[in-house]
Image (tube, grey):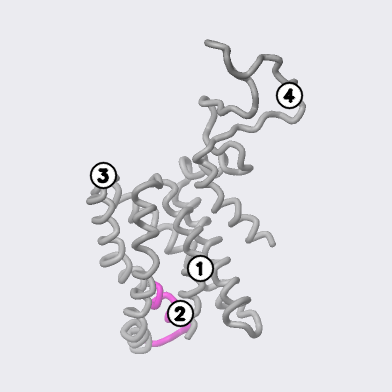
Amino acid sequence: MKLTSILVIASSFLAVSAFGVSPKPALTKPSTTSVGFLKDKAVTSSLFRDQSKVRGGAVPGWAAYNEALDKKPLITKAMTSLVGWALGDLLAQIFISGGPFDMKRFITLSVFGFIYHGPSGHFFYNWLDKQIEGKEAQHVALKVGIDQLIWCPIFMTVFFTYLGLVNGDSVAVIVDKVKNDLFTACQGSWKVWPIVHAVNFKFISTKHRLVFINAVQIAFNMFLSIIGSK
C-alpha cells in the first residue's frame, strides 16, 4: 500500500540516521587495500562510514527529505503529518471501527494533519526549543510539562472544534463536545506522550521532531479518530 510504504520510510529515518552508511554504486571495483593494520591509509570498503557524506544516505529519499526540511520546512512537515494522520485513521477504520470505509472521515482527519498538526507543530516546537535550550533532565522535564499541560489541551480543543465545524455543528454542540471529551483526550495523551517526548526532547533534533512524533502518533491517531468520530 502506497501510504504504508511512505510511512515505513519516514519512520525509518531517525533510526537509520544513527548509522550513516553511504551506499556505493553496485559496479564499483572492490578495493585491493587491506583493511586494518595500515596507518594513515584511507579505507575504501563500503562497509566503513564515509564521514564526509550525509548521515542516513543509505535510505532512499532520506537525503531529499532532509533537503526539503531545510528548504521548505513548513510544507514538508505538513505533508509528514498528512501521512501520519491518514495512516492512523486508515488503520483505525480497518482494525477497530469495522464496517464500510468512511471516506469523509478519512479525508477530514488527513486534512487536519496537513493544515494544523504539521504547521502548528513546526512553529510550537521551534519556539519551545528556542525558549528552553539544552538536553539536561530539567530542560527535558520542563518541555514535557509545557507540551502536555498547556499545548495538549489547546491542541485537543482545536481538534474537536475543527471536527465540529466540518460536520456543520452549532457552537453549542461543539462546546459540549469539548466539555465532554477534552479531559478524556488529555488523559489518553498523558498515558503515552510524556515518555515519548522525553525521548523526543532528549535525543531528537528540532527539525526531525515531527517525523518522530508522526511515527509514534499513528497509534495515538487511531485513538483520536475513534473519540473524534463518536
Q: Is residue 39 above or below residue 68?
A: above
Q: CA distance from mark 1 to mark 2?
A: 14 Å
Q: Earlier in the sequence, mark 1 or mark 2?
A: 1
Q: Earlier in the sequence, mark 4 or mark 1?
A: 4
Within the image, what quadrant is residue 186 found in? Answer: bottom left
Q: Is residue 161 above or below residue 32?
A: below
Q: CA distance from mark 3 to mark 2?
A: 35 Å
Q: CA distance from mark 1 to mark 3?
A: 29 Å
Q: CA distance from mark 4 to mark 1?
A: 42 Å
Point 61% across, 76% down: residue: 95
Q: Secondary structure at mark 1?
A: helix
Q: CA distance from mark 4 to mark 3?
A: 44 Å
- Circle 1 crowding by C-alpha within 10 Å: few under 14, some 14–19, many from 20: some
Q: Secondary structure at mark 4?
A: loop
Callout 4 amino acid: Thr
Residue tagged 3: 133
Point 40% across, 77% down: residue: 160
Q: Nearer the viewer, residue 67 or 210?
A: 210
Q: Earlier in the sequence, mark 1 or mark 3?
A: 3
Residue tagged 4: 28
Q: Secondary structure at mark 2?
A: helix
Nearer the observer: mark 1 or 3; the answer is: 1
Query: Which SS type dominates the magenta stretch?
Result: helix
Does the CB distance between marks 1 and 2 fall below 8 Å? no
Percent from the top left, x then y, of residue 146?
Answer: 26, 61
Residue tagged 2: 228
Q: Earlier in the sequence, mark 3 or mark 2?
A: 3
